[in-house]
Image (tube, rainbow, N blue to C red):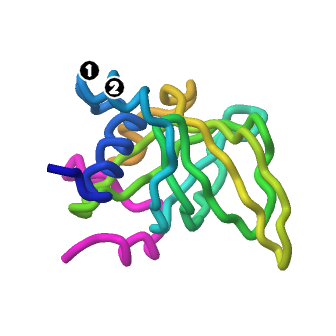
Amino acid sequence: MSETNDSITDRLIDRASGNESACATIEDRRNTERHPYTLLVGLVLLDENRELLPPLLLRARDISVEGIGLSSRGPLGVGKQGVLQLVRSNGNLALAGVEVMHCRYVKDLEHIVGLCFIPMPTGFRTEEFLNDQGRLTLFDPLLQSNLKP
């Protein structure tokens, strides 16, 4: 039985957020192809002083075992680290540590950005992104459009 794209994407999100099983890790490392993932994502980067910058709302292009491709209206600094908020197929949120690997201007204010998944960067605590009920809060209200009712 073949997996659906949602299932594969969810496994990649699990791996990125550190919630994967060892079995999934071994299997996924054999296949680094990109999978379609075109939802909005929230990104919070750290500045030079390791302070949180305001959240960015970006459109994802694809996701793989190693990272995620995004479209951005402005450039993102190569080497910057941050936290990415992803939405699973069931609407649940996940956080993943990321580092900007490349950012290339395409045209009409569009930049193609490549982020690799890393452990949560120093300076971030998951608790900073939780509400009073212990649930992840949205980095941007527009991410609500990704969530299933």
Number of residue marks: 2
Instruction: Please say if 70 is above or below 101.
Output: below
Q: Is residue 79 left or right of residue 9?
A: right
Residue 80 horizontal/vertical position (percent): 72, 38
Residue 37 horizontal/vertical position (percent): 45, 61
Quarter assignment of residue 18: top left
Q: Give the SS element for disc 2.
A: helix
Q: Is residue 17 left or right of residue 124?
A: left
The CA distance from mark 1 to mark 2 is 5 Å
Q: Nearer the viewer, residue 22 or 83?
A: 22
Quarter assignment of residue 39: bottom left
Task: Look at label 1 and name its amino acid.
Answer: Ala
Label 2 crowd bin: few (<14), some (14–19), many (20+), radius 10 Å = some
- The part of the chain drawn in magenta is 131-149
Q: Give the SS element for disc 1.
A: helix
Task: State the residue lying farthest toward the left.
Answer: 1
The residue singled out by tag 1 in the image is 22
Instruction: Please say if 63 is above or below 30.
Output: below
The residue singled out by tag 2 in the image is 25
Task: Look at label 2 and name its amino acid.
Answer: Thr
Task: Please give the name of the residue rendered at 59% of the width and 65% of the height, measured from the top-left corner.
Answer: 58
Q: Which quadrant is home to the C terminus? A: bottom left
Label 1 crowd bin: few (<14), some (14–19), many (20+), radius 10 Å = few
Task: Please give the name of the residue rendered at 55% of the width and 48% of the height, measured from the top-left corner.
Answer: 68
Residue 8 magenta: no
Residue 43 horizontal/vertical position (percent): 56, 53
Q: Kindly check if marks 1 and 2 are in contact, taking CB atoms under 8 A apart as contact.
A: yes
Per the picture, the main secondary structure of the magenta-coloured stretch is loop
Instruction: Please say if 98 is above or below 71.
Output: above
Residue 138 magenta: yes
